[in-house]
Image: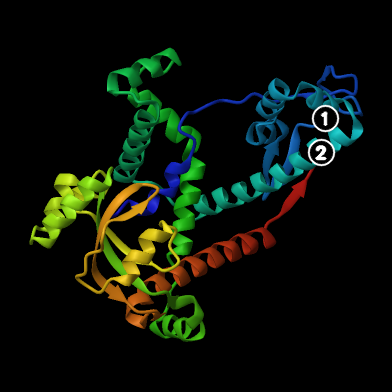
Amino acid sequence: MKFMRYKRILSIVMVLTLLIAFPAIAQNGEVSDTTDEGTQSDVAAVVNDEEISVQELQQYAGTQNLIMTLYQSFPEFTQVLLQTEPGQGVLEEFQKIKLDQLINEKLLAQEAKERDLELDQEEMNEIFNQQIEGIKEQNNMDDAQLEEALKQQGIESLEAYKETFFEMNKDQLLINKLKEDIENQAEVSDEEVKAYYDENQDSFKVQEQAAASHILLEDKETAEEVLQKVKDGGDFAELAKEYSTGPSAEQGGELGMISRGSSVAQEFKDAVFALKVGGVSPVVETQYGFHVIKVTDRKEAGVQSFEEVKENIREQLLNQKSQELWSQFQRELRDKAKIEKKL
């Protein structure tokens, strides 16, 4: 599907919030608007001639929300954090980390604009529709309730919210589109897939497996009666649908493949691997109740064939290469950038 690559774009926060800057805290715990020199620095960094303000950094870092959340749960710890030199050092280090992250985002946003990346109307509609559906599902709302909630926040309509959403998140959406463009350059050859398979045989070893179905009953007497119906030629799947109390009843009792090392009850496993294909067990008691078990297929222990695993290997290698390309791209972008930190 055309918009599958935009799934990660939708990981942006589901509720738009505007953070206000958190001013510096003096050693006595009182709010201070000044630095040691008595004037507050307005610029945290300059990235290719684009300034990052201290206020923008504090909004990005969510410093105020962080301190308020800490204070609500751990007031004494928060006071130590704010009123001691080591505590101030922790906050400063946190701010430096967030500044580096924000610088990276600035560089990526600049690159996206340099490449003239844009979201077309169809893409924007798809993203926004999924955004709205996500909000409604997360908050168990229908359309009318959502519109009422928006109005309570001063947003008059979905169109107004849409405009605000893209205004606030445009840079991040374009960064995600840039990321997809870079990662889509990754390629994995058939030779690389085969080489990985040949060099990692231990990764593809599998234990003995059996495909099992069961009918779960609450008491042994009923289980014996159902077992007799199976022995008399009754259809196992239909009897499972009629009698089984387990969640697999609707699937005719099918449990899929069970391996020797699976975490099912030991009594159940012992019965499964004692059966031949087509065999039906006596009644087996476990902590979950009484089972009548049938084995429909078996696979011996061994190594999965190349054909079985080649597409999974290809996807794994493609993801690895995509991540490497993106990391390398960010490093190169930063290496050639003109960055001046003011903090």
Q: Residue at x 32, y 51 (%)?
A: 3
Q: Secondary structure at mark 2?
A: helix
Can residue 116 be seen from the camera position used here?
no
Whole-percent x and y of residue 19? 61, 26
Whole-percent x and y of residue 178? 48, 55
Q: Is residue 108 left or right of residue 44?
A: left
Residue 90 or residue 236, whichever sits in front: 236
At label 1, counting other C-alpha atoms closer than 10 Å, the crowd grade (few under 14, some 14-19, many 20 or more) is some
Q: Which residue is mark 1?
A: 81
Q: Classify 252 as above or below 56.
A: below
Residue 225 or residue 242, whichever sits in front: 225
Can residue 182 be seen from the camera position used here?
yes
* Residue at the extreme front of the image, as rendered: 221
- Disc tally is 2
Whole-percent x and y of residue 263? 44, 58
Amino acid at pointer 1: Leu
Q: Residue at x 33, y 76 (%)?
A: 308
> CB of mark 1 within 8 Å of CB of mark 2?
yes
Whole-percent x and y of residue 84? 90, 29
Q: Classify 286 as above or below 218.
A: below
Q: Is residue 210 left or right of residue 221?
A: right
Q: Which mark is residue 305?
A: none
Q: Classify 66 as above or below 52.
A: above
Q: Which residue is mark 2?
A: 90
Q: Classify 51 as above or below 157.
A: below
